[in-house]
Image (cartoon, coloured by chain):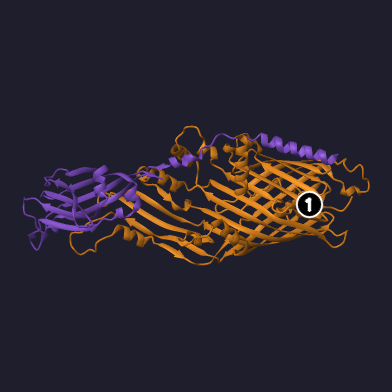
Amino acid sequence: MRKVYLIILTFTHIICFSQSKQLLYNFTSIPQSLLVNPGADVSYKYYFGFPVLSGISANVGSNSFSAYDLFADNGVNFNDKIRNVVNKSTNKDKVYANQQLELFSGGFRIGGESSKSYVSFGAYQEFDFLMYVPKDIAILALDGNRDYIGKSFNLGDLNLRAEVLSVLHVGFHKKVKENLVVGGRVKLYSSGANANSTKNSGFIYTTNGTPDTNVYYQNISSNLEMQTSGIAAFTKDEYDGNIANDLIHNTFFNGSLGLGFDAGFTWYYSKNLQFTASIIDFGFVRHTKDIETLTYKGRYEYDGVNPSFDFTDEPENVLDEFEKAIPRDTLYNKYTTWRPAKFNASVQYSFGESRFDDECSCKPKGERQYLNAIGAQFFAMTMPKDPFVAFTGFYKRRILKKLELKTTYTVDSFSYKNIGLGVSGTIGKVNLYFLADNVLEYRDVTKANSMAFQLGINFVFQDPD
Amino acid sequence: MRSSGINKITSLLVLVFLSFSCSSDLDFDQIDDLKLEPVVVANLTYFNIPANDFVDNGNEQSISFDAQDFNPFRNSLMREDLMKTEFNFEITNTIIRGYKIDLVLIDAQNNTIETLSFNAPAYSGNSNVLKFTEVFENQRLANLKRTAKIGFVITMGTGPQLTENSLGNLKLRSDATLYFVIEE
C-alpha cells in the first residue's frame, strides 16, 4: 500500500510543481543550479542532460491546510472539514503548485582550455498555479448571508493564476576575475495556456434597512475579470479535439510569446567566503493566442419586487435588471502578464580542506576543494498579494570527492520546520542528483503543508585532473 | 571501487528516504459528500402608501391593483436547489381605515397559484404593526416556483371618509429567507 502511495505521490509531484529551490541553489556540482543562478560557479568542459530526465522538479504547498485536513478518512463529515479549513484560513493563505520538466539541456565551454567562459542552453516545460483562499466567497457559499448582516463579502478574495508554458533559454557565464563569476540568461517563453484573475475587487453587502425602507439594504459591487489565453477554444461546444494533445502542441509550437531574463553572480570575498545573488524570470508574456477575457463589472442594489399603484412606473424585472447592471461581458483584448520574478541571495563559509585530492598534488592550492560549507540563503518571489519570502540555513558536506550532501533548514509562510536533504553524486561522467525538502513531513505526507523535490541525470565532462 | 561505493550510498540514501515516507489514509471520494447549505436573506417586496393616495379627486379609491414580474425562478439555482423558503411580512397601518392586502402568485399562463391575504385593522391610535410568516416547503414550494408574476390587490374596508388631507400610511415590508441545499 505504501508503494502505491509513493507512486501516486511521485506522480502528483511530477504533475504538480514551489519555486524556492533552496537545495538546488548554489549546489554547483549540479549543472541545473545555473537555472537558479546563471552566475553560479559551475565549470565543465561540456555537459548535457539526460533528455527528459535531467531536471524534474515539483513543488506543492498550501499554508493553511493539508490534504489530510480535507480528505482524511476519519469519519468527520466532509462539509465540517471544509468549514474548518475555511475558518482557519485567511484570504492571504494560498495553494501553490509548480512543476518543471527539463526536456533537454546542455552546455559547453567556449574558447580554449584555459577559457573560463561557458554557454548553457535548454528547454523546459513549466506549470504554475497559485490561488489564494477565497475566504469570503467560501463563507457565502457555505453559510449564506443570513448570519452575516452588516458584513461586506469581499469579491477581491477571488485571486488566482495558472499557466502552462515552455521556456527555451540560452545562458552565458564567465569567470571574469579569479574571485568573480557573472552570468545571464535569455528566455523565450511560449505560453500554451494562461488564466489570470488577480485584480478583482467588489463586495456583496446586506445590512438592515431603516423602518421606512426595505427590510434590507442589499448591494453588490462587482469588478471581476478573468483573462485567459489558450483556453477559450476548449470551452466551446463545438470543440472535439484532445485537450492534452492540443495543450502540448500550443505550449511548444503555437503559444503566446514572451521574453525574460535571468542574471546572477558569485563573488569570493576570500577563498572560503562566498556571496551570490540572482534574479530569475524577470520577464513577461504577451498573450495573443485564443484570448478571451470574461468580466462581471457593475453595481446593483436589490430592492425587491415593489408594486406601484399609480400606474406610471414601468414594470420591474429583477433578473433582467441584475443582468443589465452587472453584465457578463466577453472581451478579446490582448494582455500582458508578468512572470513571477524570483530573487535569490546567499552567503557561504567553507572550511576543512578536502583530503580527496591527496592522490593528485598537481592542483594548485587555490583550487582545492573544501569539505564543509555552511551558510544562509534568502529567497523572494513576486505574488499577486504579498511577495513570498523564505530564509534558509544550510550545511553542505563533501562525503567523497564526487559525492556531496546538502541539508537545509527553511522558514517560510508554508512551514517553519522545513528540513531539506539533497545529494549529488558523479559516477564517471554521470551526475545524479536527488533533492527533497520538508523531509520531516515524509512521516505523513498527507499532513504536509508543502512538499518539493527535484531529481535529474546529467552527463558532465570535465578536463582531466 | 569508489564508483560502487557511491552507488551503494546513493541507493541507500534514496531507499532510507523513501521508506521514511508514510501517509494516512485519504479518501478523495468525500468530494461527493459536498453539500452546501447556505441560508440567504433578501428583500421581497415593499410599499408605503400615504392615506391621500386612496383619494382621487375627492373620490375614494377602495381598490388598488398592480402586478409585477417576479422571475427569480428563471434561475436554475432557485429552481433546483431551493428547499424551503419563508416569507416574512410586516404591515404597519396608521390610517383610520382597515385594509385587506392580497398578494396573488400568478404563473406564466396567468393562472392564480395562490393568494396570500393579510388583514390590517383600522388605526385607532395604538401601535398597529402586524407580522405574518408564510413557509413554503414541499408541494407549496413547488407551486411557488411556478410564479412568474405577483399581483398586489389592496382593498379598503369601510369607515370614516378619507380626504386629500387624511393622515397615516399603509406600509408593507417583507423579506424572504431562502434555504438552499446544493449537492452534486
Q: Nearer the viewer, residue A198 or A163?
A: A163
**Which residue in the rendered view is the most extreme toward the right?**
A361
Q: Say whether residue B91 is left or right of residue A68.
A: left
How many marks the image carries: the answer is 1
**Which residue in the rendered view is the most extreme toward the top?**
A75
Instruction: Residue B6 in the image: state x and y as whole percent.
Output: 80, 40
Q: Quadrant of residue A168?
A: bottom right
Q: Nearer the viewer, residue B85 or A433?
A: A433
Look at the picture and state if A106 lies above or below B20: below
Q: Residue at x 92, y 45 (%)?
A: A360
Instruction: Residue A19 in the image: state x and y as whole percent.
Output: 64, 50
Q: Say whether residue A1 is left or right of residue A355.
A: left
Q: Is residue A7 visible?
A: yes
According to the rendering, which colour does chain B have? purple
Look at the picture and state if B110 lies above or below A94: below
Instruction: Residue A21 in the image: state x and y as whole percent.
Output: 68, 48
Q: Say whether residue B39 is left or right of residue A156.
A: left
Q: Residue at x 77, y 37 (%)?
A: B9
Q: Which residue is mark 1?
A: A459
Q: Residue at x 82, y 39 (%)?
A: B4
In which quadrant will I find the N terminus of chain A? top right
Dot 1 lies on which element? strand
Local packing at callout 1 (Cα closer than 10 Å; few below 14, some 14-19, many 20+) is many
According to the rendering, which colour does chain A have? orange
Q: Quadrant of residue A149?
A: top left
Instruction: Residue A465 in the image: state x and y as whole percent.
Output: 89, 50
Q: Quadrant of residue A306?
A: bottom left
Look at the picture and state if A87 lies above or below A103: above
Q: Amino acid at mark 1?
A: Phe
Instruction: Kindly identify which chain the residue marked by label 1 belongs to.
Output: A
Q: Is residue A17 visible?
A: no
